Image: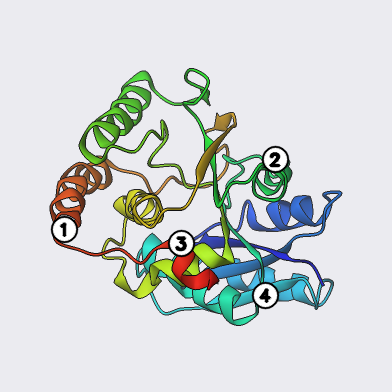
Amino acid sequence: MTDSIVIIPTYNEKENIENIIRTVFGLQKQFNILIIDDGSPDGTADIVKRLQNEYPKQLFIIERQGKQGLGTAYICGFKWAMDQKYDFIFEMDADFSHNPLDLINLYAACTEQGADVAIGSRYVNGVNVVNWPLGRVLMSYFASVYVRMVTGMKIKDTTAGFVCYRREVLETIDVDRIHFKGYAFQIEMKFTAYKSGFKLMEVPIIFINRVLGVSKMNSSIFGEALFGVLKLKWWSLFRKYPQKDANEV
């Protein structure tokens, strides 16, 4: 059995899902995959279930009714993965904007370089984003600058959705206390891990905008992130965060 699970939330990803699954399973290191599908009307879940016949011990799916938000999908997946005792739990998009080869680099950051949370970062070495309109690049980049200023985190890509967590991180921070459901979820997860004393490390990646399927991103998502980070900072003034060493007694 592998020590690693890749959680991939899906909604209408029939053009990408088989290719992303086969690509991950073709890597030198073995990763299992958990798909969280929010009732895709295009048959995404049917494709996954067909592939389960081929990969019965590596590929898993949880089907949910309707679009319930990115954050709730990941939290559902985190709980499943913790129950199954995976040591390294990954977040990744279905649309190849995250290169599956980088899973190995994120894993190495946690297993060889001492990271508790390894972040696939678009901005740690300049701006490494391909095929995005300039306005969206600037919005994303300066959103991360703003988050750093407000939270005090040194992370350059705070909204990144390509992440590896050690299981201990998710067990410590209590994922049921994560408030946000959209892209502010990504900021809240990193901030909570940071406040809990875990080591966050950025691993450079090149982010390539999807070629197939339809993006779920819109300006309101960034709005949630911008206002959400102020709430996070405010809450942090009154909240006592569980600490890393508390689980290691």
Residue 76 is left or right of residue 148, and the answer is right
Q: CA distance from mark 4 to mark 1?
A: 36 Å
- Disc 1 to disc 3, C-alpha distance: 19 Å
Nearer the camera: disc 4 or disc 1:
1
Residue receiving disc 1: 235
Mark found first going from the N terminus, 1 or 2: 2
User: Which residue corresponds to mark 4?
Assistant: 60
Q: Nearer the viewer, residue 13 or 229?
A: 229
Q: Give me the C-alpha separation between circle 3 and circle 4.
A: 30 Å
Q: Are marks 1 and 3 in contact (CB under 8 Å)?
A: no
| Coordinates of residue 50 in the picture (x, y in percent) | 74, 74
Dot placed on the residue nearer the N-terminal end, 4 or 1: 4
In the rendered image, the vertical position of residue 38 relative to residue 223, given as above or below: below
Q: Mark 2 or mark 4, which is nearer the start of the sequence?
A: 4
Tell me: residue 218, above or below residue 24.
above
Q: Which residue is mark 3?
A: 244
Judged by depth in the image, the label closer to the viewer, 1 or 3, is 3
Percent x, y of residue 15: 62, 52
Q: Amino acid at mark 2?
A: Asn
